[in-house]
Amino acid sequence: MKIKQKNFLVIILVVLMTFSMTMTASAEDVQKNSMRIGVTKEIDSLSPFISYSSMGFEAFMLLYNPLVGVDENLNSTPALATEWSLSDDQLVWTFKLRDDVKWSDGEPLTSDDVKFTYDLITKSGLGLYSGYLKGITSVDCPDDYTVVITTEEPKANMLLNSTPILPKHIWADVKEADLETWGNDTPVGTGPFKFGEYKKGEYLKLVVNEDYYGTKPSIDELVFVLYANTDVMTQALKLGEIDAATNMAPAQLEQLKGEKNIDAISGVGYGFTQLSFNSSNDPASKGNKLLLDKNIKKAIEFSMDKKKILDMVYGGQGTEGTTLVPPDGFYHYDPSADEMRAYDVKKANELLDSSGYKDSDGDGIREDKNGNKLSFVFSLRSENAQEDNAGQMIASMAKEVGINLNIELIDDGVLIDKIYSSDFDMFIWGWGTDLDPTTILAVMSTDQIGNLSDCNYSNKEYDNLLKVQQSKMDKNERQKVVWDMQKMIYEDAPYIILMYDNNLQAVKNDKWTNWKSIPQDGGYFFNLTNYNYLNVKPAGEAVSTQGGINTDSEKSNSGLIVLIAAIVLAVLYFVFKKKK
Amino acid sequence: MNKQYLLKKILQAIFTTFVVLVFNYFLFRVLPGNSLQMIMRNPKASAEAIEKTRILFGLNDAWYVQFYVYFKNLLSGDFGLSFLYKEPVLHVIASRIIPTVIMVGIAQIIAIVVGIFLGVVAAWRRGTKIDVVALSISLITYSMPTFWLGIVLISVFSVSLHLFPTSGMQTPGKSFDSSLEFIKDVALHLFLPVITLSLVLIGEYAITMRNSLLDVLTEDYMLTAKAKGFSDNYILKKHAIPNAMLPMITIIAINLGTIIAGTIQIETVFSWPGLGRLMYESLKNRDYPLLQGIFLLVTICVIIANLIADLAYSYIDPRVKQ
């Protein structure tokens, strides 16, 4: 059937020719200095009133500036404000602004923009930054480059506030009701980078701000590339398709350890993973009431070999947890030798014995004097395999001291429902924290029950200290109060902090150099500063980026195509030849 | 074709769509998990923000009010706002539809062509080595886990041979001088996902075609045709394959209908910005409006595909004429 044969051959040839055309792709060198960073969570919105994602937070640090910034040691440093002073009664702040800052559309920045931004964020209560502005009663502009902020009480975190200053001439046109949906699709800012392009589900591209008031970054083009799969992201890094990768798994970090030209680090981060116990005092709560005895919770912590869990489940990437505020900062409290609950099975057993929990019926599980078994429902989030494995280990360790943890693997949605109806005993989850300790300390306050609180802890004294520390202007005084708060939590144990999470990141050091871990052992990205974006330098002269495809081997590509074509044609010929 | 028949079928389709819509609406609301708490589980989100967002989405209204509002808006083409992106649902879906359609469309076409070809060859030469080889290939590809296959292909063609990029739809952040450049870039990125999906589908089509054709070949009229002296290829083309195509049409229709949703694995491995991944993300975040929008789309696709299959059937097969 000659015609059919010919048809087939023609089709095959056309397909192959098309592909060979695409194969000889032009060398895609981007002549500018571009940096591509692999991320696993994309930005949810370009508007600071709508975004609640960590990617959003990071991007706003690049597109906008706050009044006061943070340097690589997490100390306050001038940003849009060059200097500031505080009145004697500690209630009035005076900020002097730079007079040479332009918005990316050419308009000049004035104090009006600051007043407008602060007023709007406070009034709407939306976004990641409204919490930072609590306590501010008024913002005034005596002249174009001076801002006077008055607070109700002394405000200890005024300088730690990363609220991005927004352009009044753009945002004033947005009706307040529309603030919740207006996407800010082409952001206008003063930051070191300008908005380039956003392709949902693919990447976010920023370009350098040529008119930046500060040191211009060496990066011309900054692209955050979204990867749905971290294995592939790691391969892409090795191939040079991206120059940096974030949020990797321990196994991938291991893979990269031997690679030359790649710096893979396990950076100390700002988050922790914890066991949360239902500590509600409400008699209507459906949590197991035995858990209100802190000795049981303490005993569980004594029975936990955190180092082993870290090594086996997290590849050793992380630090054993103790108190609420993570250690890479001024406010972390290190329990004293007496207070510390390190791994000690003997102590766990002693504590349980002396609290009146004995195993009377010999089934391996202790009971209280009324016969109630120390048996609790342990909810684990099915979507996080590491938490599940850690949970399994914790349960078997608790078994050793006579506490039975019944594991149930559930979906996030189910867990959240349980939390809000106080129908749980204990679970594992995590939190990200912030430069300002207030953010994480507040989670344990009474008014967050029903909102952010996931353990229903309520302590009037703690609530009071939360307010007090917000007004302690002296850093050391504030530290003392924050330490007292952490001691309280450690003593009452509504949480057992399993570990402080690390950020597993890697960068190619043959393209960009001068990387710094922020703070001392932290990550390169998502470290609450934009330090690395501003300070990395190209390794060598202007480097071009090629997308992983070896364009030198154009010849071998075409050769491959011709070979495949020949084989296919030969096969077809034989197949058709036999048909008679 | 009968106009009445066509009309009846279309009305049925519309009615089915409506029933599915209502069912989906309640199905998602029954899922445990509070959308806003899941999206805004961030210590910096203030209580006011959460309350405002609740009001924005009408989540404080009674359930029948929400139901009524949703369907009223639907009739005027408003699919609601996505909880996660705070953008109109149609907008979000529109930006992700084309990548899915391109990738799945091309993969389906390749799979159909190659699958049918393989099935025909295997059936015609039943029992010979060619049949064994074709059948083995089909069974192997049919049972391969999609995810695994994708990673293997990346490993071979991207990592080892440097022929294709690992993932994504285009080189991130690159600006193109001409559309041809852009098309070339996308084509390169398309290659691996398409091959992965095709391989997975080829097996299914090949085996079905083979079985269907084998059935036809045992029919009496095949013997008659041979007795009449027609050449093998003529019999194949004019008698055997057309009759064997009927089950194939059904399968193709079903598969085309699920074009949208069936590619989550591939989209995850290759970070392909399609609807499959979007659906998974919106499910995780309990983004009801977005989920409902995507499911509506899938429903319509499935129903239309089946409608076309129905009509094609009655066109091809004179016995089914109404």
Image (tube, rainbow, N blue to C red):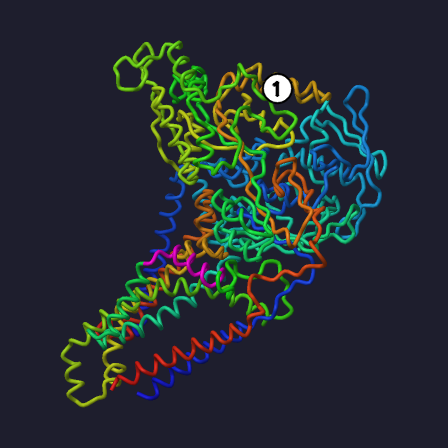
**Residue A186 higher or lower than B250, as above or below:** above
Helix, strand or loop for disc 1? helix
**Label 1: few (<14), some (14–19) or many (≥20) C-alpha neighbours in 10 Å:** many
Give the total of numbered labels. 1
Could you tell me which quadrant the C terminus of chain A lies in?
A: bottom left
Direction from residue A449 to residue A98 in the image, left or right = right
| Residue B146 is covered by the magenta coloring | yes
Callout 1: chain: A
How far from the left and from the top, in percent, is residue B48?
A: 58, 32
How far from the left and from the top, in percent, is residue A235?
A: 51, 54
**Residue B3 higher or lower than A54, as above or below:** below
Q: Which amino acid does the dot numbered 1 rest on?
A: Trp
Image quadrant where residue B302 sits: bottom left
**Front-most of B190 and A338?**
A338
**Residue A541 higher or lower than A520, as above or below:** below
How far from the left and from the top, in percent, is residue A436?
A: 65, 29
Could you tell me which quadrant the N terminus of chain A lies in?
A: bottom left
**Front-most of A179 and B22?**
A179
Q: Which residue is mark 1?
A: A483
| Residue A417 is covered by the magenta coloring | no
What range is drawn magenta here?
B144-159
Main SS, magenta residues: helix
Direction from residue B269 to residue A135 in the image, left or right = right
Res. B48 in view: no
How far from the left and from the top, in percent, is residue A173?
A: 70, 46
Q: Residue at x 26, y 74 (%)?
A: B130
**Front-most of B311 and B281?**
B281
Image quadrant where residue A399 sits: top left
Res. A410 in view: yes
